[in-house]
Amino acid sequence: MPTNFRGTHQKSAKVGQFLMLDDRSINHPKPWVMDATHAWEGLCERGGEVPWQPRTNHCGRGWGEVLGAWCLVLGAWCLVLGAWCLVLGAWCLVLGAWCLVLGAWCLVLGAWCLVLGAWCLVLGAWCLVLGAWCLVLGAWCLVLGAWCLVLGAWCLVLGAWCLVLGAWCLVLGAWCLVLGAWCLVLGAWCLVVLGAWCLVLGAWCLVLGAWCLVLGAWCLVLGAWCLDAPGCTSHAPGCTSQASG
C-alpha cells in the first residue's frame, strides 16, 4: 500500500471519529450544555424576558398602546374631516338649490324677453304699415288739397298732420324694431347661456354636495371604528392576566 494512501486513510478515520456521536456523548452531555440548559429553565421560571420578544411595560402593552394612540388620532381626524365634509355638502346643496332657482328665474326672464321682443316686432311692423298708410293719405290729401282750393286748405292741413303722424309712426316703428331685436338677443342669451349654465352649475353642486355628505358619513363611521379599535382603551388584552401573575 502506498504511503500517501495510508496517510489519507488515517486522516479520514480521525475525521469520522471526531464527527461520530456515540451513546456516551448523548447520555452524558458536556458541562457547558447543562449550564446553558439550567440557566434557560431558571430564566423561564422567573418570568424573565426572552431576548427576541418585543419589550413591553408591566401590563404587556407595547405596540397595542401605539396602535391605539394612532387609531385615536386617526379617528379624531376622520371626525373633523367628516364634519367638514358635512358642512361643505350642506353648503353645496344650498348653492345648488340657489343656482336652480336662479336658472329657473333666468328661463322665465328669457321667455318674457322673447315674448316682449315678438310683441315689439309686431308693433314695429304695424307702425310701419300705419306710417306708410299715413304717407299715402298725406300725399292723397296734398293732391286733393291742390285740386280743391276751398277744400284744399283744409286738406293741406290734414295732409300735413298726416305726414307728421306718419313720420312719428316710422320713428316709433324703428325704435320698436330695435327694442324687439335687443329683447330677442337678451332672451336668447338668458335661455342658452345663463339659464343652461345655472342649471349645469346647480346639478354639479347637488352632485358635489351628495358626494361630500357620503364622504362625511364614511369618515364618521371610520372615526367611530378607530375609536373602538383594539388597543385604544386602557384595558388592553393581557393586562389582567399578567398583573395577577
Image (cartoon, rainbow, N blue to C red):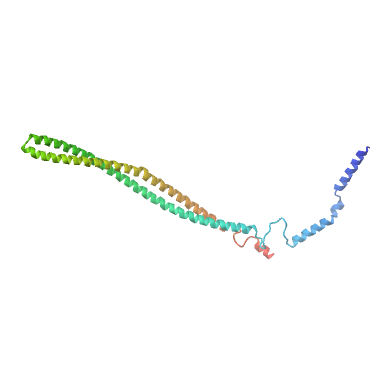
Q: Is residue 133 left or right of residue 115?
A: left
Locate residue 65, reporting x and y percent: 62, 59
Q: Quadrant of the C terminus?
A: bottom right
Name the spot of residue 237 as percent of width and height, x first: 64, 60
Q: Is residue 224 visible?
A: no
User: Which one is in front, 89 or 20?
Assistant: 89
Residue lying furthest bottom in this view? 244
Eyeballing the image, is 125 above or below 208?
above
The structure residue drawn at horizontal position 12% and vertical position 36%, both measured from the top left corner, is 142
Of 106 and 165, nearer the camera is 165
> Which of the 4 quarters of the picture holds residue 127?
top left
Res. 110 in view:
yes
Image quarter (top left, top right, bottom left or bottom right) of the N terminus: top right
Q: How many marks?
A: 0
Residue 214 in picture, x, y percent from top left = 49, 52
Residue at 83% x, 56% y: name it. 32
Q: Is residue 156 left or right of residue 107?
A: left
Task: Kindly identify the residue that appears in the image at 41 percent across and 51 percent down.
Answer: 95
Specify whether 192 is left or right of 218.
left
Q: Percent position (x, y) of residue 42?
A: 77, 61
Image point 47% across, 50% down: which residue?
Answer: 211
**74 up-or-down from 158: above or below:** below
Q: Residue furthest left?
A: 150
Query: In this rendering, would 64 be left or right of 88?
Result: right
